[in-house]
Every structure is written in C-alpha cells, then in structure tokens.
Amino acid sequence: MALLAQFVNYEGYRGMFEAQSKNRMGLLIWMSHSCWPSFVWQTYDYYFEPTAGYFGAKKASEPLHIQWNAASDNIEVVNYSAGAAAGLSARVQLINSDGTVKWEKSASLDSAEDSMAAPFKMEYPAGLTPVHFIRLELRQGRKLVSDNFYWRGVEEENYRALRALPKVAIDAATTSERPRRTVVPDYHAVQCVTESGADGAS
C-alpha cells in the first residue's frame, strides 16, 4: 500500500508541475503536507519526511527539462530559467516490460530561455506489452542535461501489469567520511586572553 501511494504521489506532483510547460499561470498547492499520517497528497509527511511527491515536483521543475505530454503525445523541452541553450539533442525510447526497445527517435534543437519546444511526437507500434515505459534524455554534447521516465498502459491508466514484473536483486554500496571535529576553545580562557592581552599583561 505504501509503495503504491508513492507511485501516486510522484505521478501526481510531477504531472501538476509539468502541466504548466507552455501556459505558466502559476501553481498553488493545497496542501504541502498532512496534519495526520497519510499515504497521499503531500510533499512531506506527518513526520517531516519527504515523499515521492516532493521528488516528482523537483524533477518537473528543472531549469531545463524534457517531458512527455500525455494529452498531446508530444515530447517537450521546457526551458524555465536555464538561459539560451544551443546544440541540444532530445531522445526517446519506448521500452517493453521485458526491456526490449520497440521504438526510438531523436532530434536536435536549440532552446531559448522561458520557452517550450516540441521536437517530435510519440508513436506506438504494434507488439507493446500491457504496460511499457517511455525513457527520455536531453543532452548537450555528451552532457546529460535532463532525463525522465514514464510508464504507460495500452489500456489508459491500467498499470496492473507492473505488479507482475519480476523482482531483481540490487547490489549497492556506499562510503562515508568521518566528519572533522571542531575544537571549541574554552570560553573563560578566551575571555582572559581578550581582557588581559595576548601576552597575559593587563
């Protein structure tokens, strides 16, 4: 239940912020968090922990952002505040649930600040699995500027096939450095030096 709620939170908040790509009239959210433990409709929860909704909003608010417009099926490059960006390459892959790439396309473009461009439209070939994925990348040369990932159902809003995906083992490792300790001088010693002078003379 909690995992499915995170899916809903991420999709909902990312969608709200991505919807203002062309007509930016502002966005008012009620509410940012709940006043009791809840699964949905919050960017951070009752215990002040960020939910997937927070990260969905953060993803959609990138200064230079690539996204799929589910209403028009356009792939859009939205430049909110990244300045003029030349020499961009937008790329999309349509991926079945078994990992096979069923369709892909790319296009070159320049992006002016405070603009939205739609370099191409999605196409859906035959042979798609009940739930499939849309992977987007926006690059400037070799540098990855923005990426995005969506799930789409052959039957609109039917994502039940996600539950049938096989579980995989994930190996992860992390390292950390011990923080440096700061030695705080004794207040009284500092006060004595300040009042009597560095050489101890009054």
Image (cartoon, helix red, strand yellow):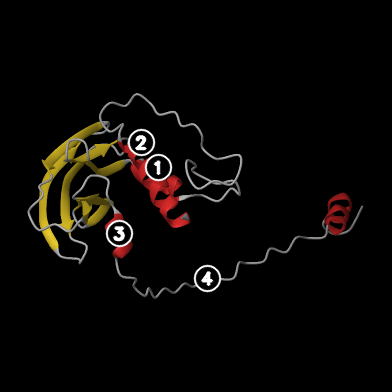
Question: Dot 2, crowdedness within 10 Å: few (<14), some or many (≥20)?
Answer: some
Question: Dot 4, crowdedness within 10 Å: few (<14), some or many (≥20)?
Answer: few
Q: CA distance from mark 4 to mark 1?
A: 28 Å
Assess whether mark 4 and mark 3 are in contact (beta carbons under 8 angstroms): no
Instruction: Give the amino acid at mark 2.
Output: Met
Dot 2 falls on a residue whose secondary structure is helix
**Mark earlier in primary sequence (3, 1):** 1
User: Is residue 86 shown left or right of residue 80?
Assistant: left
Disc marking residue 57: 1
Indicate which label's residue lies in the foreground, 3 or 4: 3
Indicate which label's residue lies in the foreground, 2 or 4: 2
Residue 43 x/y as whole percent: 49, 43
**Mark earlier in primary sequence (2, 3):** 2
Residue 72 x/y as whole percent: 17, 36
Instruction: Give the amino acid at mark 4.
Output: Ser
Please tell me which residue is depicted at 39% across the width and 41% down the height of the picture: 13
Assess whether mark 2 and mark 1 are in contact (beta carbons under 8 angstroms): yes
Disc marking residue 176: 4
**Mark earlier in primary sequence (4, 1):** 1
Instruction: Give the amino acid at mark 3.
Output: Leu
Residue 132 x/y as whole percent: 21, 56
User: Is residue 32 shown left or right of residue 98?
Assistant: right
Assess whether mark 1 and mark 3 are in contact (beta carbons under 8 angstroms): no
Disc marking residue 162: 3
Indicate which label's residue lies in the foreground, 1 or 2: 2
Instruction: Give the amino acid at mark 1.
Output: Ala
Please tell me which residue is depicted at 32% across the width and 27% down the height of the picture: 24
| Residue tagged 2 | 16
Residue 62 appears anywhere in the view: no
